[in-house]
Image (spheres, grey):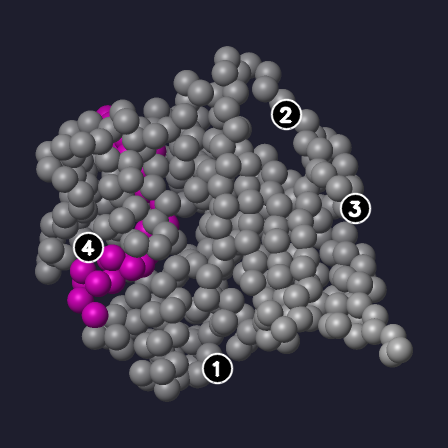
Amino acid sequence: MEKITYKDAGVDTREGERAVSLMKEHVKKTFNPNVLTGLGSFGSLFRLDTAGMEEPVLVAGTDGVGTKLKIAFLMDRHHTVGQDCVAMCVNDVLCQGAQPLFFLDYIATGKVKAEKIADIVRGVAEGCLQGGCALVGGETAEMPDFYPEGEYDMAGFAVGLADRKNIIDGSGIREGDVIVGVPSSGLHSNGYSLVRKVFFEKMGLSVHDHIEELGEALGEALLRPTKIYTQACREVFAQVKVRGVVHVTGGGFYENIPRVLPEGLRALIQKGSWDVPPIFRYLQRCSGGSDEDMFAAFNMGVGMMFFVREADGEKTLEALSRAGETGRMIGRVVKGEGVAFAGPEAAK
């Protein structure tokens, strides 16, 4: 009878071991004294430091990178999407007023290529360093016949810690509060199914095409990693009693802002109060979409928002400046429901 090995079935465990060996140097850079295990243990151990907290609460978040990965495949560049994965999870945890503690990743691929997996994890480690969390573990699954060779999917899991009395859930938002926006780095990791349909199918563009309006190749603009807001949040939380935080992800302004608004209150956004990056205007022109369409799908240049008392608005801007961010007053809270826009050609 013919012998069939695991490798014959498409799974090369030795290549997986080589990938782990290559990624170790990147992972260890994220460790801190609270990490009690190295790579290879069945479970990851992390010591909780709850000194000074009255009622410690763990805050968890999970997310992926979505079809932005298709751009990485086309560019054959894989380290930036690791940062995207961390950002999408860590930024959500920050919205509750928590400080990120640790992160785990999951990568599934049709065929493990050690250098590529290590490159992805290098980006995850860089994201963890920016996010202030340790990369304590993960999983790489080789799944032949499930994913095409050369492609992969990934997801991440972040855990943070907050004192219950300091948790931010939007319940304290009041009429008259101001909304401070923090710039995004671009599209971040949302809306790429639409992006690909517009640029590649409708316009027939390539990731390598230089777009004069963008000042760079299209793929460079599309693959720019999602900004991580840990340092910005640390500075703001230390100086201001924040009433609500919004991470602007899929669903744009219309879906994300109402998640923190108490009943009977509306966010009135002042259009023109911040700079919209060229990628959004170019995408809008190519797609033919309205302003409303764009604000319903994308961050439009605002990656995170802080809801604070009007009296704390300037203090919030100063805290952001210390974190290296240029914040903008982009709106205020009024009576009503949902989201509305003011200013030139306001979205309905």
Instruction: Report the mark closest to the observer, 4 or 2.
Output: 2
* 302 falls in the magenta region: yes
Left or right of residue 126, residue 55 in this image: left
Check contact, mark 4 vs mark 1: CB within 8 A.
Answer: no
* Three-letter amino acid code of the residue under disc 2: Leu
| Residue furthest bottom as drawn | 204
Q: Which residue is mark 2?
A: 48
Of the numbered discs 4 and 2, the one sitting upstream in the chain is: 2
Marks 2 and 3 sit apart, C-alpha to C-alpha, by: 21 Å
Check contact, mark 1 vs mark 2: CB within 8 A.
Answer: no
* Three-letter amino acid code of the residue under disc 1: His
Left or right of residue 232, residue 159 in this image: right
Q: Which residue is mark 1?
A: 208
The relative height of residue 287 versus residue 31 in the rendered view (above or below) is: below
The relative height of residue 282 versus residue 139 in the rendered view (above or below) is: below
Instruction: Report the mark closest to the observer, 4 or 3.
Output: 3
Instruction: Report the mark closest to the observer, 1 or 2.
Output: 2
* Three-letter amino acid code of the residue under disc 3: Gly
Residue at 50% in and 71% down: 70
Which x, y percent locates residue 169?
34, 30
Residue at 11% in and 37% down: 336
Instruction: Report the mark closest to the observer, 4 or 1.
Output: 1
Residue at 10% in and 60% down: 345
Residue 272: numbered disc: 4
